[in-house]
Image: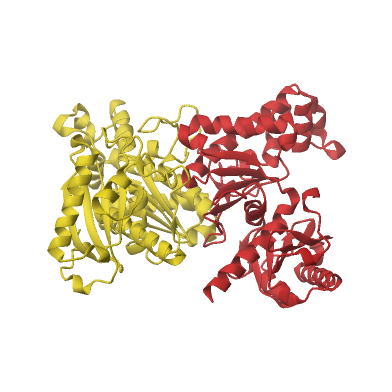
Chain colours: A red, B yellow
Amino acid sequence: MPDHLPIIDSGQATQPLFWGVDVGGTNVKIGLVDDAGQTLAFEKISTEVSLGPQAAVNRVANEIAKMEQNLGLPRAQIPRVGLGTPGSMDLAAGMLVEPPNLPGWWHFPIRDSLAAALERPVSFINDANAAAFGEYWLGAGRAYDSMIMLTLGTGVGGGIIVNGELVNGVNSFGSECGHILVDSAADANLCVWGGGRGQLEAYASASAVVQRTRERLTEGASSELAGMLGGGDNELTAKQVFLAAEQGDALANEMIDETARWLGIGVTTLVHTLDPGLVVLGGAMNFGGLSSPIGRRFLDSIRQEFRMRTFDNVYEGTTLDFATLAGAAGYLGAAGYARAVHRQTAAES
Amino acid sequence: MPDHLPIIDSGQATQPLFWGVDVGGTNVKIGLVDDAGQTLAFEKISTEVSLGPQAAVNRVANEIAKMEQNLGLPRAQIPRVGLGTPGSMDLAAGMLVEPPNLPGWWHFPIRDSLAAALERPVSFINDANAAAFGEYWLGAGRAYDSMIMLTLGTGVGGGIIVNGELVNGVNSFGSECGHILVDSAADANLCVWGGGRGQLEAYASASAVVQRTRERLTEGASSELAGMLGGGDNELTAKQVFLAAEQGDALANEMIDETARWLGIGVTTLVHTLDPGLVVLGGAMNFGGLSSPIGRRFLDSIRQEFRMRTFDNVYEGTTLDFATLAGAAGYLGAAGYARAVHRQTAAES
């Protein structure tokens, strides 16, 4: 994360400070962020899912205590902590519900457990919403009041900000853009996690790209990816599809264009609902982003589908872009959300 | 509008007061509403579209002056006016753009024209957004922080409130729920107003119900509606479909169920985007609402489609209901929006 190197000297910080904790299936990212969005300290620790949630909370708390000590920072300067985790979750209760990425952590009161360990209030949000809030505060959305972010990975996540407010939803299911419907056909694709038919996630996630490519290869489509049907070390991934597309492989390019078409349909629906002025694509599956001809073509193909399906003024008035904070978006957004809650609380008291 | 009879004695009013002006293709509704949502005065005048927008603005201003005089109210007690019109519009500029329902009114600066005539600031919004804001403030949404309203008429309109804020959009295209995509097929229906393919409006508007019914009748479907293909006085309307359904006509009931199915798809997408806890159906096409078995069946069919496509907790945590303010929602919402802007402005100064 070269854009977000810690600044060592906490004397340069704008008070107050906030911890942002971004829990993933593999790593937990922990960052100390000042009121202006500068990162003062950062650590990445292994999640160790199998050891259970309380062990992870304790390790996060120890890590934070250590960093505070090293920096010589009193707790009073860091009044609140932001926590993002993968769903499903119950935000009001502060509970993990049944997160598929965190087996063994189901129905755990993670918010209050972390708050007790840190002796500070914790603001709890969905990880994709946290990433969107990070981009809104410090990344691609800096100049906007509202935005929609789609997070393209194994699944499709989303985060929506309307007039500065993150859309968490009353059932902790706000901004679940991967679950909007793009295909109403009776035989539409099933969602990666099971459940709904015809939802965006089943068409525009990395899993969907792989599945569609496998189907075409099984049908005998000619492609340099044909050797990857066997699995093992040579397993087919969205990254492999991207690499083949960079080599000019026709099937790989077709698969990326098809993904873009479905995303264009989803983007149209989301923009017609909220008209935010900005749609941001984040997550691991960005086909190289703006630094690759394939990534630029991917973005252009989404734009073309959107253009075909919307009105001229809405097309002209909507920016579609890649996210800029990469893997830092989650902890920055968690910290930013804690900052927003802190300000709201201060304004109300 | 029996629920909203004017209270005559303005001494009972909660200050300040706001005018709400709801411009339609046939009538303009003008209501004086107090800070608690009570209507102190109400007039409906003919829009007279053919006389042009400046003439209509003058007649609205005269009507308001007359009512203020009758009530003995000084202007200072009514600091702001809310104005709702059918789109398309440019909210920031205060302009009508190309509203299909108001031929001859295109590219007219209606907000500033009315503000000049009334010597007061005017807050300008889309008519469906105004209706939604009315339901949010005083109707079906009273107990909610967020809600989505779908307005079913010739077209499908929408209005969205997120955490108390109306979603107007940066291109004046926020909350256009009729334009979300429900059918991605290449031969999907075209929108009533032209343009997009596969959008909700082309499946769930009164026009769509009539078109689908005509198609089935032309194909020879047996129905008591068969005599209505000729046009003229006996022209087929969504109302006729509703009346036939009430008589037990199988085709008519099938058409209503199909409409409900498409709405269930649209509701799923909207709820997965915003998870507001409440979805309200308004507009003329409510098949009798809760007072008719057909209306209740319509609502239930939408619910069943939504249930099939969402998660249990989201289904349980989302209320789907008919609007309660009927034709009063627009002027009440316009007044309520003026009130919200007035409060915001007061808080910021």
Q: Would you identify the image quadrant in which residue B339 lies?
A: bottom left
Q: How many marks?
A: 0
- Name above or below for residue B85 compared with residue A164: above
Q: Is residue B59 left or right of residue A272?
A: left
- Name above or below for residue B246 compared with residue A65: above
How far across and how far down the image is residue B194, in percent?
Answer: 38, 30
Q: Is residue A267 left or right of residue A43?
A: left
Q: In this view, does B146 lie to the left or right of A100?
A: left
How far across and how far down the image is residue B189, in percent?
Answer: 41, 31
Q: Is residue A8 left or right of residue B229?
A: right
- Quarter occupied by the C terminus of chain A: bottom right
Task: State whether residue A55 appears in this view.
Answer: yes
- Name above or below for residue A235 compared with residue A347: above
Q: Would you identify the image quadrant in which residue A235 lies?
A: top right
How far across and how far down the image is residue B261, in percent?
Answer: 42, 44
Foreground: B34 or B66?
Answer: B66
Foreground: A347 or A287?
Answer: A347
Foreground: B269 or A162?
Answer: A162
Task: State whether residue B185 appears in this view.
Answer: no
Residue at 16% across, 33% down: B234
Residue at 44% across, 65% down: B349
How far across and how far down the image is residue B97, in percent?
Answer: 36, 36
